[in-house]
Amino acid sequence: MVEDSDSILIGTHLNPDGDALGSALALSLVLDQLGKPHEVVCNNLAPYNLEFLPCVDRVKLEPERTHDLGIVVDLDALHRLGRTQTFFESCQRLAVIDHHIPHEQPGDLRIVDTTASATCLILYRLFVALGVEITPDVATLLLTGIVTDTGSFKYQNTTPDALHAAAQLLECHADLGRLSEEVYQRKPLASMRLLGRCLDRLRLDVKDQLAWSLLTAEDFSRTGGSETHTEGIVNELLSINTVKIAALIRQPSADKVIRASLRSREGYDVAEVSRLFGGGGHRNAAGCTFESGSIEEAEEQLVKALRTCLESS
Ligand SMILES: [Mn+2]
């Protein structure tokens, strides 16, 4: 499909993470090697902890022109493209490269491996098979996706394959030291202040197995924080020893939608809960949005569903 196309539009899911941007940008650098004109678009620019990624300034909110082939990475449903969805609908053909369990089957060509720890791992295998050069920048991008999607090789999805690929990417001179420092050790003060407010308001139920908290528009304005500063907070809630399911519900400003991030330990499927509210994700890491109603109403509905999930698992 790449050979048959004149130009390519690369895209990924909104609020992109390390795997989304690592995949999109690694693919962009490889298309350079193949001499293919292309652009990279996303509904949001890189969050602060991914601004170090090689060629991150290639990510644009909208394309400058039209393209005949679209390639979307790390997403299972086209609505997750956000505002960029329309640009992909006007491509003649669409390819999807992903590792989520598919609930929709978009695309004319689908390269989907739900056993892969990260989309970057699928791309790594593809690049090796294509015989393209894994430059240090490509290696850093691919390793970022594998490191972040496996929680630095801590999550259950860490496979021998992921570790083998990581070793090989280090041999290709991926910059793991820089990656670790930039992704995990450059928190803006607002992130810490939001975490503090979140812990202050921590709520527990079902014998302390369910933990959740809220961040209101007032919290965001008082701390000077934004949506991007909430990254990772929900994982802190899940790290409490009794907790099996954790949720963070937040509304960055009164005129913005309410978002919820869900995390769970093995044996608890929070993707199923997020789908009840039109969201998606993985069994142990998922999210959804509430377009209307108050944050307290969203909390009530979500906590009720999470209680049911806990008690029926
Ligand atoms: Mn991913």
Image: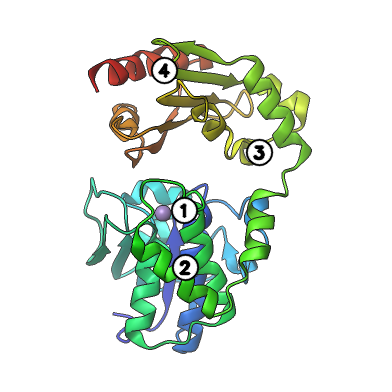
Say the numbered circle drawn on residue 14.
none
Q: Residue at x 45, y 85 (%)?
A: 36
Frontmost residue, 211 versus 26: 211
- Crowding near the residue tagged with mark 4, few <14, some 14–19, many ≥20 C-alpha atoms within 10 Å: some
Comes first in the chain, label 4 or label 1: 1
Near mark 3 (Cα within 10 A), the count class, few <14, some 14-19 or many ≥20, is many
3D distance between C-alphas at marks 4 and 2: 34 Å
Q: How many marks?
A: 4
Looking at the rendered structure, the kind of residue marked 4 is: Gln
To which residue does mark 2 refer?
A: 166
Quickly name the residue at label 3. 229
Q: Give the Cα separation between the discs numbered 3 and 1.
A: 23 Å
Q: Which residue appears at 42% of the width and 51% of the height?
A: 81
Decide: is 186 above or below 27: above
Residue at mark 1? 153
- Of badges 2 and 3, nearer the viewer stands 2
Q: What percent of the width, then of the height, locates residue 189? A: 78, 37
From the top left corner, tell me how far across and down residue 84 is, in percent: 46, 55
Residue 68 appears in the picture as rendered: no
Mark 1 packing: few (<14 Cα in 10 Å), some, or many (20+)?
some
Does residue 116 appear to the left or right of 182 in the view shown?
Answer: left
Q: Quadrant of the N terminus?
A: bottom left
Q: Are marks 3 and 4 in contact (CB under 8 Å)?
A: no
Mark 3 or mark 4: which comes first in sequence?
Answer: 4
If you read the primary sequence from the N terminus, does the residue marked by circle 2 or circle 1 appear first? 1
**Ligand 1 is found in which quarter of the picture?**
bottom left
Q: Residue at x 34, y 51 (%)?
A: 78
**212 or 224: nearer the viewer:** 212
Percent position (x, y) of residue 16?
Answer: 51, 52
Query: Is residue 141 visible to the viewer in this orientation of the structure?
Result: yes
* Residue beneath disc 4: 209
